[in-house]
Amino acid sequence: MASCRETTRRADRGYGVDATTTGESAGTVSEVLALIEIPRGSRNKYEVDHITGRLTLDRVLYSSVHYPTDYGYILDTLGEDGDPLDILVVVQEPTFPGCVVPARPVGGLDMRDEKGSDFKVVAVPVGDPRYRHVDSMASLGEHWLKEIETFFATYKQLEEKTTEVLGWHNEEEACRVIDECRARFRDTGGHA
């Protein structure tokens, strides 16, 4: 099975078709395709209905906080909770709901909410030269990590729901989780 580090997915810029190439070669950038549901700075919680394909407003955050990154999921994955694997794409400027962003995983945030385990991959956009130097959680910067952690520790407080941040993980662990979720997607045909 190809690992996260060995698989490159590139969106065909003209037709929106995916192509997967396997194998690490000089200059190859490991990336995933992130479908963005919620842009950075938003309080609106959008979700894609995976049956109809429609983007719906799930709710507006009850707390006076906003998403610190673009937030969505990695295409062709299925998490333990039956949803696609969550991804946080650290961006300077927000994209928009429904935008597909080629992103490079640098780590992950393990947490638990009222539904159980909820791992989130942390990635940077491949198309932004400001993030070329970011190759690990450490090179992302301590303040980004604090801001993300604080958001997820507190954003559901006024909904009377609990969240627990369990800790940060490196790129290798994030890639292991991605591989596991890709295998689950393949094995189940994308259904929980």
Image: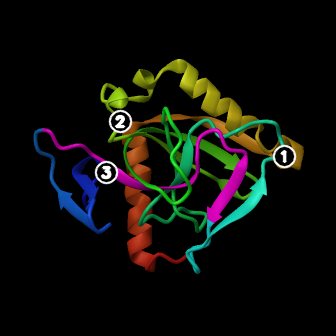
* Magenta residues (range): 27-47
Residue 48 painted magenta: no
In this figure, what is the number of numbered marks? Answer: 3
* Residue corresponding to mark 2: 128
The answer to whether 137 is drawn above or below residue 71 in the figure is: above
Residue 48, position in %: x, y? Answer: 60, 67
Judged from the image, the secondary structure of the residue bearing numbered disc 3 is: helix
- Name the quadrant of the N terminus: bottom left
Other residues around mark 2 within 10 Å, as few (<14) / some (14–19) / many (≥20): few
* Residue corresponding to mark 1: 62
Other residues around mark 1 within 10 Å, as few (<14) / some (14–19) / many (≥20): some
Which numbered disc flags the more N-terminal residue, 3 or 1? 3
| Residue in view at x 53 percent, y 19 percent | 142
Q: Is residue 129 visible?
A: yes
The amino acid at mark 1 is Tyr
Residue 103, position in %: x, y? Answer: 38, 46
The amino acid at mark 2 is Asp
The amino acid at mark 3 is Cys
Q: Is residue 135 visible?
A: no
- Please tell me the numbered disc located at residue 119: none
| Residue in view at x 52 percent, y 60 percent | 98
